[in-house]
Image: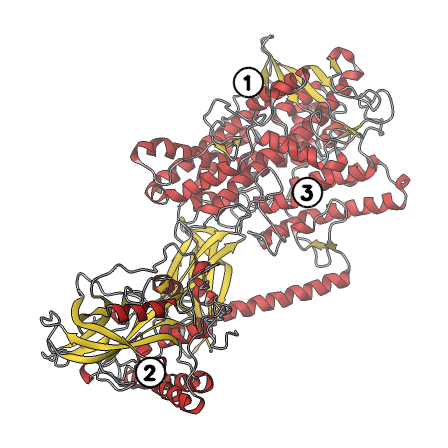
Amino acid sequence: MTNTNDLTPKTVCAECLKKTKIGYDDGGRFFMPHFKSINHVEVGYSRIITNPLTIFAEWLLAKFYALKDGLVALAAKLFPRRPKIYGKQMDSWLVGKIIFATQENVEVPIHHLPLEFWGRTKLGQWRKLSEGYSAPDGTFRLPFELRCARRFGIRSLRFEICQISHIYFKDGQANTVHNTFHCIKISKSDLIGMEYNLRNIPLCFWEYRTDVKNPRVVIKAHGKDAPQQYTEARIEAINEQMIPVELTKIKHLEQIKLDSDSITLAEIQADYPENLTVCIEKKLPGYTRGDDWFGERMMNGMNRGLFLPDTEEEGAYWMKYFGKHNYDSNDEYAFPDAMIKFRLKADGLPTPVAIKLRGPLNAINRDPWQERTFTPADGELWQQAKRVARVNGGLCTEVDEHFAGTHANLEQYAIAAYRNLRFSPLTTLLFPHLKEVVLINHTADGILLRQYIPSATAFTYEGLMARIVDVMGVMDWKSFQTMKPLSEAHSYAKAEQLFWDLTYQYVDYFIELNRKEIIRHWHEVFCFSEDLVNHSVPVFLSDTDMTHIDPRDRARFEEMKEYLTAQFCFDYDLPRQHRDGHLRTVSPLTLTSTLSPEQEKEEIQNLKKACTYMIFVATFLHTWANEHQYEDIGEVLYNCLGLRYGDKESGILAPESDLSIAPDLTRSTQMMWFSNLLSRTEYGFITRNEDHDINPYFCELLTAKKDEFAALGVIIEDIESRTNI
Amino acid sequence: MTKKHSFGTFIWHMLGAAWDKMVLWFISKMFAWALVVTLSIPHRYRMSHNNGIAARGKVRIVDNPEFPPHDFFEPGRTFPARVRHASATFLDDAMNCIRSMSIKFSDQHMDSPFDMEMNTGSINLFWSARSFLQFAKLRKQKWGVEYHDYYRKYPQGLEGAKLSLRRNPTSFHNLRYHSLTPYLFFGKDGLKRYAKYRAKPFDNEPETGITTNLSDWDTCNQRVFPNETRTRNYLKDEYKARVAKEGAKYMMQIQTRIAADDDSPEIFNNQIPWDEKIFPWQDLAVVEIDEILSWRDSLMTSFSLNNLPKSLRIIPAKSIYDYNSLNYMRSHSEVARKARIFSYRLFGYPPEIPYDDNRNVSEWSGKE
């Protein structure tokens, strides 16, 4: 029990942080409903199994599958696939070419794919007849002995194309596990000696989508026809954390459907686990709506925003959240530009001194260029303006920083890496951090980008996609820099620097250790770089003819460009590649498929920075955005991502008690469900190393900094190893 | 390190080898009888090279041979000879076809001390009995387009076709013909050797009809060119005119190599020409042709790999996958040849190929 005398903001915040910290200790019960897959999660009614009979049947089915898996495992033990290659007189060859099943005009070869040629005897034994890899041009020529393949005892023949399924570390050594990606059965009678041509084998292997502007992978059927699968433990993590939340949401939706008057927003809020702001409000009413809290969260909370120095006023900073102005949007939700002016207090934390809102604030005056400025002297209006800025900041952080900055940004690296890295030791460095991001992004496509955000914020789906492409147009590994701390209290920037440094130390160690092999397989790095550059989005505004647009629009674009450039550390002056008529955002790591001694220093340096960037984004940056959601957008009235205009002239400048501008009940419960889903269901942490895929050296480096991170409010055990939620 | 075989393994291998030979023999016989039943008797066809013309003359072994001395190839020895040129498989000289030259060291329809069958191209479209059966199975010919499945599956077959097909050569005489699969060669020194044969124009006239940069699909398409003005018999007509005017003179050449215990089976592979720098072509005999045979004599003239001296016979084959099984199977198709001659007696001789507009066909009837 806290002594009331100790109720300082600092102690209350610490206590509430501790109280609302998400734990992972609910193992569930037999008849507890559960999800079958992350892809069964829905904003509306998720596909969960609730009926006890179904649960029992599901249990039986699970046992059946377990038995089947057991039999498969037994068969694998009885008929092992031994590495010995049968045959001495290699007089025949399987030939062909493996290409991407791309819809582009030219064939794109898939290099260095592991290939195996197996025979199965009539008694079920496996005979490896040949093995090899596809060449850099995608062709292969696997030698085998014709007589071995055509033996009477051989029942069937299969040519298998493999891929790296996962990496694990054992005794400090990285091990690469392959699985079969594609199998082609070959008729024995077709083998007549010399070469047998399997011709062009087009594989839907980490294909780029062509229906979106930013690089995304093709996933035909989640869980079945996807380039990756989640681990079973990842599904269990969702079950443990989300079933109670899911049931709460379902209860609310049923109540709203039956009689929307039977439930209030406050009751919805109360049904969900208490978050940080709710907890603090109970102990220090009004504190979370105050200027101190506002400034602190903007600096060290989920937003971790950029403080752009005011060019005219020394010691003043601007934080800018650009609204829906030039994006496709609906007419129900407000999303004006919000510019917040800060000054630093004596304790080093920022305090807002002015808020400028540009754009419509109510449903009556739709002038997009109207501007209003608020200061603390405005009393109640100041509170309301802060709420608008907070909500806009929440949405911008979710879309720009979280989804575009980590999920979508990382996906482009993941696709390029999985398409091209095979022999290079970089696989063991990067794959553990790049895995599963494409899967969660695919899920996000449905529930977040198509369903929730267009219904709960001002963005339409098209507007949202355009925004993501715009923001990705200023994200480049090459110009990235960590945030400069504004003061001693800028703990986020300090933690970011600390994590970047140790990640760089790890990457530097790894690359130096494997430098020879990396250079030997530089072709893979080149292909990785080419895919990355060719598919990256155009540089922000590079495709826009600025001379023919409204001067006010031009000025706003320039302002947006200036801020986003600083926010994402983009350097417009870096030399960039023009590909397919567009100036590409992402810089190449290399432009040659072999590394010459003259280039070596610079390009290895490029590689180190790009790898550090990828790991940093996948781990620290994403974890920060993700785990703070529950703190900063876990209370509907505090921050709801979208305020409705309502029908009053005051519009969104109204107190929290005016529920006509707050999200409706359905959107409210969905929002609460969302923030719980995103923050609660993390799985795959660096130090826990659940899948044994993290380099022990990286864990050691992080563990050694545990206290330094703790002093900055970062618990290293909570830093995810990959972006998978 | 040598690998020791147990007695059981030895017996097992012997049984396996016997089984392989039995399969080869059985398949060769079956194939020959299949030809009898499906082509020779009902259609009076050869297996493939129906569209041909035969001529007679003489063959003289060169006076100063550089190849190893051999009892049969005595310097200056002269034989009467017959030569038959043909286009496989279509009855249309203007199609893109493999062309052939068969030579017989006698002026008889069948009997001869030495017969040699050669085709254009330095490599073949098939390399063993098994691959030949697959080749036959995947022909799927329709109006002059054929073997697309075979070429898709077997790159060597496709390469063989590209190198062997001759489109609109100016004459049978200026082409180069190769025996491809090697033969035995026991010379006077008693050493076992292998030999390959080829024929070329005596005056080294440049070869015509070679097409380059053929795509896979162009290779399948052997049809005459659109608006083709050459007749179905233009090559035969040219050859008749050439022989009547000046005769046709060829140089037959031989390539030999000494057999060794550790020879790779690949030396028998007709897809891999022997290196001419190591195993140079040596002049063997000069063939001079001075008289065209009648259509009927042309039909009756038949060649056989069994018409070889013992010291120059085909190399024994071990299985249907053995590269030498091709010649083995050819030598076992004697019955089909005899059946065709017999069918002429039963049903009369097929008519000469008409000068009509039934192009791109391999059937005498003009129907596919």
Instruction: Report crowding for label 3: few under 14, some 14 to 19, many 20 or more residues within 10 A (C-alpha).
Output: many
Q: Amino acid at mark 2?
A: Asp
Mark 1 and mark 2: Cα distance apart in space = 108 Å
Q: Indicate the secondary structure of the residue bearing disc 3.
A: helix
Viewer-nearest of labels 3 and 1?
A: 3
Viewer-nearest of labels 1 and 2?
A: 2
The residue tagged 1 is A487
Residue closest to the eye, B87 or A610: B87
The residue tagged 3 is A677
Does label 3 or label 1 sit earlier along the sequence? 1
Q: Amino acid at mark 3?
A: Leu
Q: Is residue A690 left or right of residue B198?
A: right
Q: Which of the image's four quarters has the C terminus of chain A?
A: top right
Q: Is residue B103 above or below residue A424?
A: below
- Residue A218 visible in the snapshot: yes
Q: Is residue A316 above or below residue B265?
A: above
Q: Is residue B281 left or right of residue B220?
A: left
Disc 2: host chain: B
Q: Quadrant of residue B247?
A: bottom left
The residue tagged 2 is B297
Q: Indicate the secondary structure of the residue bearing disc 1.
A: loop
Residue A514 in the image: state x and y as whole percent: 35, 43
Q: Which mark is residue A343?
A: none
Mark 2 and mark 3: Cα distance apart in space = 92 Å
Viewer-nearest of labels 2 and 3?
A: 2
Residue B359 in the image: state x and y as whole percent: 48, 68
- Residue B264 visible in the snapshot: no
Q: Amino acid at mark 1?
A: Ser
